[in-house]
Image (cartoon, coloured by chain):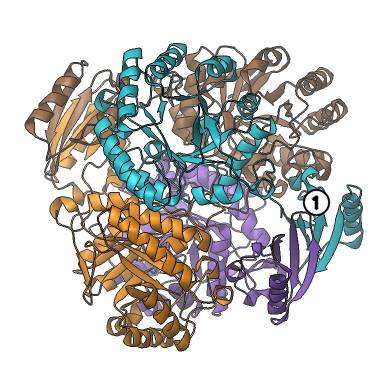
Chain colours: A purple, B orange, C brown, D cyan
């Protein structure tokens, strides 16, 4: 930790700060500069709240040197973590494709679309049963009935199921019926929910928040791992920017950053990122070229009548075509799909 | 609702869209333009998912005309709502001041600071018992013990208590011991939590999300009201911008916008907005001049040893001085404080 | 153009607005809604300042239907524009690669690096002679001497040269010595500079502004074309977001959007977008997969001693390796490189 | 300057870095941490490009300690700078009000409105003769004719004139006819234009860029001062955020930050910041309460027919009312208006 001190600080105040820091078992190296002095601190600085050090009027600035994450940090865990979902490995050579409708709309619908995406080449089935909607008057999902419909579609197709958990009080339902628990973008910093899924051993697909930094996202994964669950999968779904021609802005640079800084796999969601089915294919191919471990894509067989997000849903035939092109790109970068 | 159609659409597809819309009991007015045609729709468009209309390849754009909020909307409820908290009225002539430490650190600490802010002129006591922290290794709050300490401080000082609820499973504890339930910025779109507090009749202080629009914030209030709770208070606490010299950017234009579009009161949090105690006074005076119904300010008597956020905490004497200056501004704009 | 009127408007005011609009030769279609009335306007709405219509107290909202760009618009110019630079075609089947150092540091340096990037497979040479720097104390470029050094490197290697013009008063120097004039991100809305390059027939590489929308970027191209210059090439170089682990955030969805809405080619700058040489290769491969017409990449043979931006510069051997991988991706998407 | 080194760095590479730094006359203090080592550098670090140090693979991070601005820095110039404009002092006790239409539309219009704002209490006249417009088809201003109309309005009313310069080639016209040269938001990092006005001694009103940080803004002022012009006035006009209900987001915290870090005055533009005349009064009162040295406000006597920005223009009578309320707030904070 680096503390920058104002030159106007009087000697007594500086001495008081030194004593305070030393009483916390920190070693101080002082560097005298032209306009500022600097304290370099070594020791267990994690226990210090830097914003309280900053409250000291003689302090100009406080900067942390070390990364604030440990369990997720590749520095302390150099090998890739591969998450196993009913035998399907996320983070290995094969790029895993999750596909399905935005929302489960009926048992028939999800079973039908599950069959279609299986045929087109998907490895897993997605579909929302609990839907976080901006408006209380919009369709809120089929809830438990939707979860049971997903379970039934899995039984018929063999596709493992990924779906969003919005509230810790439904967690038993998810543990029993679901293969990957999704934490949605709006709940990325719902710390109690992170702790709750951290106490299970279910794989967790952790979406990046709407306007969160990668560091905040990594810290959300650290929350889950700090409760014992090692099966965390990052999912980039676009961030909010000023752009209005797309729903969000897909940030593909996260792929290499997540791989450099953590040991966990990362999946890309081109559907929410672009919000426009016409952009999903090129975003998917780019994600594969950039090194993604998986894709999660919205597929619907009647998008103009979808209960939600029709604009970003591919029809099954377009999805199948995407898979074929994706395979060729995957091969170039040494992966399979 | 306004649907813009591409000129390249063939007549059959246009006819199919018309029939689809008419089957939903919508009346269509067609406007033929030079480069686009436009359908103006009248009827219950709330039931339509505009992003699914947009999935239709002949559709270029879909725009809503009406505001998506009803219960919160001043158009349908022209009088100001005044929220009564144990006799203290928020949204009336008096500007209400809530003050206290970022976190409850001990029973002694919160009782002591409660006495100090009471003496300086505060109307209510703030203090976090459940703390949403970016890191799982940072202080997470005293939890239930903290709630009981707040209740004890209230007993000694008479100050009503406002504190953050992070998870619906603690709601009974809050109903029993707390006067205003705060929903934090990171939970502004935790829709299940919004529904949970909506089912109570406790006043709710609804903080604006880190990077949320005013419309999304108003819709979060609509969630609470749609469950029956009419006692919603907006709280602006700064939004995330590119600026690094402040923690967040305080958006004071929200005050008049919230008052124009809704009938609910609005409180300003200059402490989180600026993140710097040196900026809190000027931000507070500006908020009063701009028409705020209240302030929520962090006060700590030993900021450099605060468990969190010392950098933005005022010492009691500076807080008292702020109150005095604020009174003079309040008078100019026809309020009291 | 769609004007939404408040229901509270009195009849006389509405009549005055109608007469005002009709006096401008606009045809009005009125749609009576439940909470608002809507005027759909047909005619030459481009002459209307929508923000002045909005000044009318009875108006709730004004929305444009038509796209504000004409010359750049694919709707009126369906065929791809291919920009010819000394025989090299940008926007055709071949993906064009521009490479070189951030800044021209000496005649020897730029000639040496020109040779290195030529050998590695570059089609053109980049290098800044006039440098827009945040600090007046940072290296401002070699200016005219740098332009002459670039011209000399071109003579030795045959590589056409692209470099940034910061001020219209240097334009003759650029017309004479440079093959593509670059407009930098900070000057994207320097309208007088846009008009100046619009009056030439030199190809213009138009970088997207730091925090500009795609529509604003397209309008900047419209400025150039409206003065007569048809040789505009878009260049995405990342936009400012909250992310701190990268310098900017590369937005690859722009590729398909620019191609759908305009007829002009688009080039990607992965170096400025990521700010980190370790991320340049994966960003480049992703850009090719997403359909880019070209890449502009910073290459330096001694990055740790570069006068600027060493952190994002590839060494020549890494650049050569990138080109090889890029070729394989290009082939998959039906291009060459 | 603080350089953080990876623990994986081998000794030879570290030694090479040390020698390189020492050859630049920098003194190094080494701090050995648990996960990283840190070099604290003292000496003339301004000459180092930190992004090139970062290119070294053994370097994890580079952070600057000192502020990058000198001439503008209050640390080296503790007294307030007061800019004198024809005897009117900006930065003193009196809050200075500049008012007038967005654009000069005719000689008659600007003379008439000049008289109206003078009567209402304005100290200076604003009005655009050269207009930076997003579209080349929008009104671009009356140019030289507009400048002469402003000069004529000044002659009739005695009000000094502030107007925007878009291109250095018009600078003589401005030196002769204008009292304050405005640099617009889109040109805040048009460094050649900054240097050009820096070579004059005319007062410069430097608007903050659309999405620029305060540090970048201060550095733009440093550019002007580094050429010799000491008469720089900052002008906050709102920054771009995700919010759609306002045109921009007014950041009033800049007032105290500019005053703490620099010695220059700061003026607030509530018209562009909010984009809505209904919000201008409350924003202006807030700005005064927060400590602004001046206001620049758009006033038009027929906003619905304004050539531009009618939506944010106050009518003269509303402007007069604002001035009266502002006076009362100014008095409370120890200023006059």
Pick the residue in front: D88 or B320: D88
Task: Work out which quarter of the rendered image holds the N terminus of chain B and state it.
Answer: top left
Across and down, in percent, residue C67 comes to: 36, 27
Pick the residue in front: D2 or B12: D2
Q: Identify the residue under disc 1.
A: D56
Q: In the rendered structure, the residue with mark 1 lies on which chain? A: D
Pick the residue in front: A309 or C254: C254
Question: In the picture, residue B7 is in which quadrant?
Answer: top left
Q: Is residue C83 above or below residue A237?
A: above
Does A271 sit left or right of A284 as displayed?
Answer: left
Residue depicted at 69% across the width and 18% down the height: C179
Q: Residue furthest left?
A: C11
Q: Is residue C248 above or below residue C61?
A: below
* Secondary element type, mark 1: loop
Question: In the picture, residue D73 is in which quadrant?
Answer: top right
Q: Is residue B52 above or below residue B229?
A: above
Question: In the picture, residue D62 is in which quadrant?
Answer: bottom right
Mark 1 burial class by Cα count in 10 Å: few <14, some 14-19, many 20+? some
The answer to whether residue B70 is visible is: yes
The answer to whether residue A147 is visible is: no
Pick the residue in front: C69 or C322: C69
Q: Is residue A2 above or below residue C264?
A: below
Across and down, in percent, residue C274 comes to: 64, 45
Does A34 sit left or right of C67 as displayed?
Answer: right
Does C261 sit left or right of C203 as displayed?
Answer: left
Across and down, in percent, residue D261 comes to: 60, 49
């Amino acid at each position: 930790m680096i503390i920058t001190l104002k030159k106007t600080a009087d000697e007594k105040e500086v001495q008081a700060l030194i004593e305070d820091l030393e009483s916390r078992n920190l070693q101080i190296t002082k560097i005298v500069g032209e306009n500022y002095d600097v304290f370099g601190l070594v020791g267990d600085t994690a226990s210090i709240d830097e914003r309280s050090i900053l409250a000291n009027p003689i302090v100009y600035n406080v900067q942390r040197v070390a990364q604030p994450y440990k369990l997720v940090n590749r520095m302390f865990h150099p090998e890739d973590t591969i998450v196993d979902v009913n035998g399907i490995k996320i983070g290995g050579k094969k790029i895993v494709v999750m596909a399905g409708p935005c929302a489960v709309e009926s048992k028939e619908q999800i079973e039908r679309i599950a069959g279609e995406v299986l045929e087109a080449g998907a490895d897993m089935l997605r579909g929302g049963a609990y839907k976080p909607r901006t408006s209380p008057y919009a369709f809120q999902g089929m809830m438990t009935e939707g979860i049971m419909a997903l379970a039934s579609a899995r039984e018929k197709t063999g596709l493992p199921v990924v779906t969003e958990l919005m509230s810790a009080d439904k967690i038993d339902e998810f543990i029993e019926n679901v293969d990957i628990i999704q934490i949605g973008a709006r709940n990325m910093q719902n710390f109690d929910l992170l702790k709750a899924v951290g106490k299970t051993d279910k794989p967790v697909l952790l979406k990046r928040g709407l306007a969160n930094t990668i560091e905040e996202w990594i810290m959300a994964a650290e929350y889950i791992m700090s409760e014992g669950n090692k099966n965390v999968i990052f999912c980039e779904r676009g961030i909010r920017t000023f752009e209005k021609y797309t729903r969000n802005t897909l940030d593909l640079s996260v792929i290499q950053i997540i791989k450099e800084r953590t040991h966990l796999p990362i999946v890309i969601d081109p559907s929410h990122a672009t919000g426009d089915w016409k952009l999903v294919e090129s975003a998917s191919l780019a994600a594969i070229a950039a090194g993604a471990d998986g894709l999660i894509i919205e597929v619907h067989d009647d998008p103009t009548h979808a209960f939600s997000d029709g604009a970003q849903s591919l029809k099954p035939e377009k999805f199948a075509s995407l898979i074929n092109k994706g395979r060729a790109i995957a091969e170039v970068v040494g992966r399979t799909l």
